[in-house]
Amino acid sequence: MEKLYHIDLDDSHGAKYAILPGDPARVPLIAKYLDDAKEIGHNREYLSYLGSLEGEKVLVMSTGMGGPSTAIGVEELYMTGVRNFIRVGTCGAMQLDIVGGDIVIATAAIKLDGTADEYVPKEFPAVADFDLTEKLVRSSRDLNYTTHAGVVECKDSFYGQHDPDRMPVGYMLKNKWEAYKMANCLASEMESATLFTLGSVLRARTACVLSVVWNQERAKAGMSNPENHDSDNAIKVAVEAIRKDILANK
């Protein structure tokens, strides 16, 4: 096949697994955990490395921020033969028992993104693949990381969350935020709902592991609120989950 327009990859990579950070700078940090990894493409926000784990080809490709670029990246990777997608990202925690540096594994996502709406009706849930998600949880616990698994909020507007009073619909944003907190939503991020929705539509396996940066609710409550900008633990969780999946299917 010809190289695809956005990601600049064809199907010659032979990978069935892809790890998807948002930030291109995170791609080489992930690739160092793979065997013989090297850059194979870079176009727009899509930086791609190819390596291997346990003899199986694994891609690492950045998706940029938000649903639209994530959807394009996943669609085109699927066209090249990828069938297993794990997002590695960051989030802001919403429950008071979650602190910076903890690991959040998304089992499902609240669809506040607009991209998923162009695939499925609003009431259709955005749910991760159970088997891949279970391997993420098990890997995180095996690594002795503080691990939380549950529902996350997936939004389109970063500043809608962090400066809602400036927004004409701020009253709605704040009311929904409080409702999600009461319903035990764990954290907020920007790509999981799109990824999970595409997993359902494409019949691909999708999962998501997040490193907690901080917790604005702990800050508001006057509690200690450590900040963590190192996503290495989340990366290790994703790599180990893929290793478990490869070995389980050999």
Image (tube, helix red, strand yellow):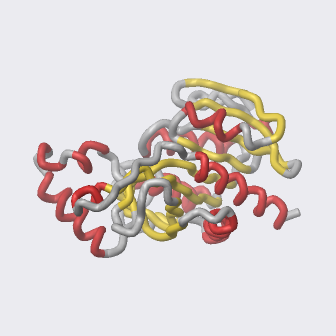
User: Relative to 224, is 205 on the left or the right?
Assistant: right
Residue 50 in picture, x, y percent from top left: 75, 36
Name which quarter of the figure residue 157 lies in.
top left
Q: What residue lies at 65% left-to-right and 56% top-to-bottom?
A: 237
Question: Looking at the image, which residue is at 78% across and 36% down?
Answer: 13
Question: How far across and down, in percent of the image, does residue 120 sit?
Answer: 43, 60
Question: For residue 110, which quarter of the picture?
Answer: bottom left
Which quarter of the figure is the N terminus placed in? Answer: top right
Q: Is residue 142 above or below residue 213?
A: below
Examine the rendered structure and indicate whether residue 29 appears above or below residue 182.
above
Residue at position x 33%, y 47% from top?
Answer: 156
For image coordinates 78% across by 39% down, the residue present is 51
Estimate the x, y position of residue 233 in percent, counting from the top left. 60, 52
Left or right of 215? Residue 195 is: right
Q: Is residue 118 visible?
A: no
Residue 61 visible in this rendered orientation of the protein: yes
User: Looking at this view, is 214 or 199 the one in front?
Assistant: 214
Total labels: the figure holds 0
